[in-house]
Amino acid sequence: MDELEYLRKENERLRKALNDRQQVSIASPRSFLEDHEFITDCCRYAEGIFSKQDVKKKYHFDDATWTRLGEDEALIETIELEKVRRVRSGAFKREKAQQHIVKAPDILEKIMSDDSANARHRVDSIKALDALADPGPQATPPADKFIITIDLTADAKLRSAEPDPNDVIVIDATRPAAIPDKTEDDWK
C-alpha cells in the first residue's frame, strides 16, 4: 500500500470518527433536558399532534439517535411532566382542537354543495362557514347606554314663568351587569 492510499484511508476513518462524535454531541440526551422547544415537540409527538417523522426531521435524528433518546429515563420523565403541564394549562386541548377545526370548512362546504342535502342543513352550513370566515359584525348590537331625562319645569309652565334650566335633570347611564336574584332576602 502506497503512502497516498494510506493517507486517504486514514482521512476517511478520521472523518467517519468525527462525524460519529458530532452526532453524539448533537443528540446528547442531557443537552435536550434544558431545551424547552424539544421537550414540547416530544410532547406533541406523544399526544399525536406531531408524527415521529416530523420530530426526527426537525432535529435531524437518525434511527439510532431516536432509540437512544427513548431510553433516557430523565428525558422521558421531563417529557411526562411537560405533558401534564400542557394538559393543565389547556395548551394540549387548544392545539388538538386547532388541528381538527381546520377540517371543518371542507366538511361544511360538502354539506353546502350537496343538492340532495336537507335545505336547512345547507343553510346552517352556510351560516357556519360565514362565521368561520369572520366577516365582522353583521348587525349593530343593541346599545347598552341609555339616557334618563327628568323634566321638573311643569310648575313654571303653569305659572307662565320662564322655566329654570336647572329643573331638567339628564342622566347618561349604562346597563348594569346582571343583578343577582335576592328575592329570598326580601322576606326576612
Image (cartoon, rainbow, N blue to C red):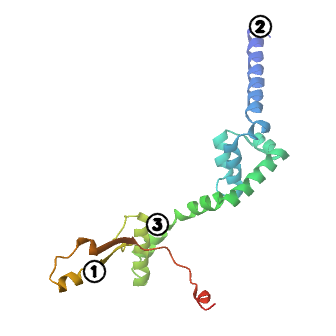
Of the residues under marks 2 and 3, which one precedes in the sequence?
2
Q: Is residue 156 left or right of residue 72?
A: left
Determine whether label 3 and label 1 are within 8 Å by CB: no
- Label at residue 3: 2
**Residue farthest toward the bottom in the current orientation of the protein:** 187
Compute the Cα span from label 1 to label 2.
116 Å
Q: Which residue is nearer to you in this view: 76 or 66?
A: 76
Position of the N terminus by quadrant: top right
**Residue farthest toward the top in the current orientation of the protein:** 3
Q: Can residue 43 be seen here?
A: yes
Circle 1 is placed at which residue position? Answer: 152
Query: Which residue corresponds to the image point at 77% horizontal and 32% vertical from the top-left?
Result: 24
Q: Is residue 36 left or right of residue 150?
A: right
Of the residues under marks 3 and 1, which one precedes in the sequence?
3
Query: Which residue corresponds to the image point at 73% horizontal and 52% vertical from the top-left?
Result: 82
- In the image, what residue type sits under mark 2? Glu
Compute the Cα span from label 2 to label 3.
69 Å
Q: In terms of image quadrants, where is residue 164?
A: bottom left
Q: Secondary structure at mark 2?
A: helix
Determine whether label 2 and label 3 are within 8 Å by CB: no
Compute the Cα span from label 3 to label 1.
60 Å
In the rendered image, residue 67, in percent from the top left (x then y), is placed at 79, 44
Residue 145 against residue 155 in the figure, above or below:
above
Circle 3 is placed at which residue position? Answer: 105
- In the image, what residue type sits under mark 1? Leu
